[in-house]
Image (spheres, grey):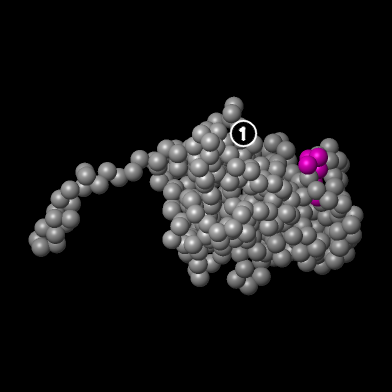
Amino acid sequence: MPPHGPEPAQAAALIVNTAGQYLLHLRDNKPGIACPGMWSLIGGQREGTESLHEAIARELGQEIGLTLQNLVPFTISTRTALDGTPEAVQVFLGHWDGDASALPLTEGVMCHWATPELTDRLLMDPGTAAVLRQHRGLAPAPPHPRPAASERFAAPIDVHAALVRPGTTGWEVLLTRRAGNVYASGLWHMPSGHVDGSHEDVVEALVRETAEETGVVVAPHNVQIASIVHHRSPQGSVRMGIFGVVRSWEGKPQIREPHLCSEMAWYPLDRLPSDMVAYAHAGLEALLAGRNFAIHFQESDDPIAHLVDSPNRVRLMPATDSTLLGGLAEGLDVLDRQ
């Protein structure tokens, strides 16, 4: 794709299991479709005003009955349309461990887990082959097209609830271990989630997510916004995280979503576990340092977890010293009168 090309209208999913195998889809061998009789990724055309993420979620559900919550953008690929012209395809990366032969296939011949070695011997559409080579580190990433002039970059906003209580040696925070087909499954995190839409603010979202995940009731006035973290994951997705401290609530925390959380535990704020999501760890680092804003941009080869021997990408940003702004309002008033 040229660096200034249009936003892709196609979306596809590169799904990998724990064994490092790729979920491939054998297309029907009939005229009138793209890449007939070839192995490919599940995907399709964006419909209406839906986003590319919404498009791939719909295609996965329609074609193989699969719902994944951990899809992140991976790369921009190309495929050849029926008229011979190239089309841009946004490829999302996801993880799933399951029986490919048991998927309720509605299109194509079959789905199959393929080892990296096997993919070199399959009849595969060139775009899929290029994506697999890139994922295996055998080819450089193609240049990403810039959005069209009318498109603006947008990042999701998520909220993280730091429920804290006095411990024997200091403050303790409630952590939850992620489970199931979600991003960072198996690692410690905090009750968290996305702002659902324009109908709720970040405090309302934090109160809702805390209730959904732990069962406790938090009054909005008991939420103290501690830090904001501008985060980039190793896969390249970017988001803004709002970290709120809660010291008072009603009820006893318990696991309300066992398909997404395997356990809960209290940890001292200054002795957090090593198998914790680095992004969540960054927010608590900012809290402990008394900083209200941090940048946490990870590199592609960074682990998702905050490991002792891995690079710490947290950049704690300094706050404005309001005492240095004395007379600013008066100076602006003078300028307005000139």
Q: Which residue is situated farthest in the top direction here?
A: 309
Residue 112, compared with residue 221, is above or below; it is: above
**Residue 291 at x, y = what percent?**
40, 42
Q: Nearer the viewer, residue 128 or 250?
A: 250
For image coordinates 81% across by 43% down, the residue present is: 21
**Residue 131 at x, y = what percent?**
71, 46
Residue 297, compared with residue 82, is above or below; it is: above
Q: Is residue 275 left or right of residue 98?
A: left
Q: Is residue 304 highlighted in magenta?
A: no
Which secondary structure lies at badge 1?
Answer: loop
**Residue 293 at x, y = what percent?**
42, 45
For image coordinates 70% across by 57% down, the residue present is: 257
Magenta residue span: 18-23
Q: Is residue 230 left or right of residue 336?
A: right
Q: Is residue 261 left or right of residue 323?
A: right
Q: Quadrant of the C terminus?
A: bottom left
Other-residue count near label 1 (Cα within 10 Å), few / some / many at <14 / 14–19 / ≥20:
some
Count of labels shown?
A: 1
**On the image, numbered disc 1 is attached to which residue?**
274
Q: Nearer the viewer, residue 175 or 236?
A: 175
Q: Is residue 19 highlighted in magenta?
A: yes
Q: Nearer the viewer, residue 263 or 87?
A: 263
